Image (cartoon, grey):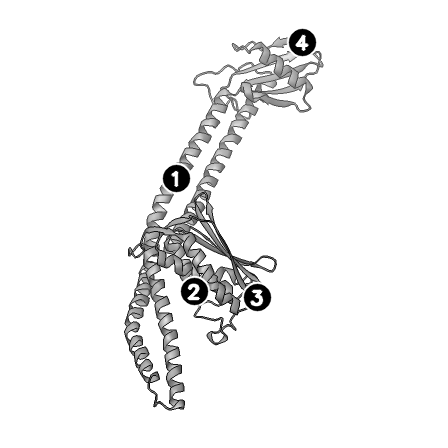
Amino acid sequence: MLKKLKRKFVAIVTTLAGIVLAGVLAMSLYSTYVNQQGLIKDALDRNLEGSTEAVPVIGAARKSEAGTKRRTNMLALTVEISQSGVVLESSDDNVSINGPVLEKVVGQALEASSNHGSLPEYHVSWKSATTGSGTTRIAIVDTTAVDDTFHNAIVRNIEIIALGILVLLGISWKLADWALAPVQRAWDQQRRFVSDASHELKTPLAVILANTQILQRDKALPADTRRWVDSTAEEAGHMKTLVNDLLQLARADESVAGTADILKRTDVDLSEIVSSAALEFDAVAFERGTSVEDSVTEGVHVQGDADWLRRMVRILIDNAVKYAAVGTTVKVTLEQRSKGCRLTVNNQGPTIPAEDLPHVFERFYRSDKARTRDGGTGGFGLGLAIAKSTVDAHGGSIQCTSDEKSGTTFTVTL
């Protein structure tokens, strides 16, 4: 649980910080783009107005006379064309332009509905205006330097974001350890308390059960007194089951947390376990007016603890049989998957409300608050919690779905 909480904490911190970083860099990039487009527009406007000082000059002033536009050191050229597209005149700048490129610019300028455009593949931008004589003047600038600068800025920003996210991951991972340290201590203390308390309760419970069994064998015990002894023995038995369940959960928690190597890692024939459990509960189901139907792929093996896996399968089938409607069939399926295997247990009966589905694996949680042990179907609300802890300890996953059409299905993937 704490590992998932830590991963979620790291993901949230990294995502939020990454979004902020990406937003800041995106704004900076947009500002750069706007400024560069402004430079291109200034160069086009200046050349379109008839200036011939478009050749870059080292050390040229950024401002001309007061009130005039700033100078921009970009390669620029101005041509004047007739209505038929014939070049009549070009600026005297020491700048030349590739013939096919000029042809494309003139063609685009004559056909376009707008008075400006670009040829990104040639790193060229243009702007046109009609002169008083009816000819068209086109200002052309080379945007190679501007485009390369903007492209390099994009690459640098991506590198900064990637590096920033990596640094954030490292920082947030360490920060998560510090932030979750009190939670980890409380969790460890709770787990140790449950384990220690369960161990300590086993001995007095064993004594109580032994004493009540002795009293039950006493033939001279009055009937009224025997009734109280039998009740004590029954409740002591329930308490023993509860203690064993809590101890099992504590061991599973230790295994999941990696604080103890309790699981036996051996090759387990899961097909044999599922088939045996289905056959065992078929008789129980018959008494309840239902049946168990299994579809088990032979030879499905997993690495794990056979005793734990056997109990997990029994819990799921027992739960399905208990709540299956009379006359229906509990379906147990085990199939081999590309990576591992999948076990499904389905029954038709009262569905689990949607608001209860996220809580079915919580300890002591009961979807139907009316179910009690006295009703015959109730328990302590630990069975599904034990099943989930067992699956988690084996590195698998378990899910539950429930609706009127498909019934209730528990799916285990190992």
Q: Look at mark 4 in the image and give the residue it sits on.
A: 86
Q: Look at mark 2 in the image and give the residue it sits on.
A: 383
Q: Look at mark 3 in the image and give the residue it sits on.
A: 325
Looking at the image, is mark 4 or mark 1 earlier in the sequence? 4
**Callout 3 crowding tier (Cα within 10 Å): few <14, some 14–19, many ≥20:** some
Tag 4: residue type? Val
Residue 331 visible in the picture:
yes
Looking at the image, is mark 4 or mark 2 earlier in the sequence? 4
Tag 1: residue type? Gly
Displayed quadrant of residue 156: top left
- Where is residue 110 shown, x and y percent of the image? 68, 17
- Where is residue 300 shown, x and y percent of the image? 42, 48
Q: Look at mark 1 in the image and give the residue it sits on.
A: 164
**Callout 4 crowding tier (Cα within 10 Å): few <14, some 14–19, many ≥20:** few
Mark-to-mark CA distance, 3 and 2: 20 Å
Question: Viewed as shown, does residue 314 lie left or right of 80?
Answer: left
What is the secondary structure assignment of the residue under circle 1?
helix
Query: Vertically, is 224 above or below 366?
Result: below
What is the secondary structure assignment of the residue under circle 3?
loop
Query: Vertically, is 50 above or below 226?
Result: above
What is the secondary structure assignment of the residue under circle 2?
helix
Mark-to-mark CA distance, 3 and 1: 57 Å
Between marks 4 and 2 in the image, the one whose residue lies nearer the viewer = 2
Mark-to-mark CA distance, 3 and 4: 90 Å
Tag 3: residue type? Ala
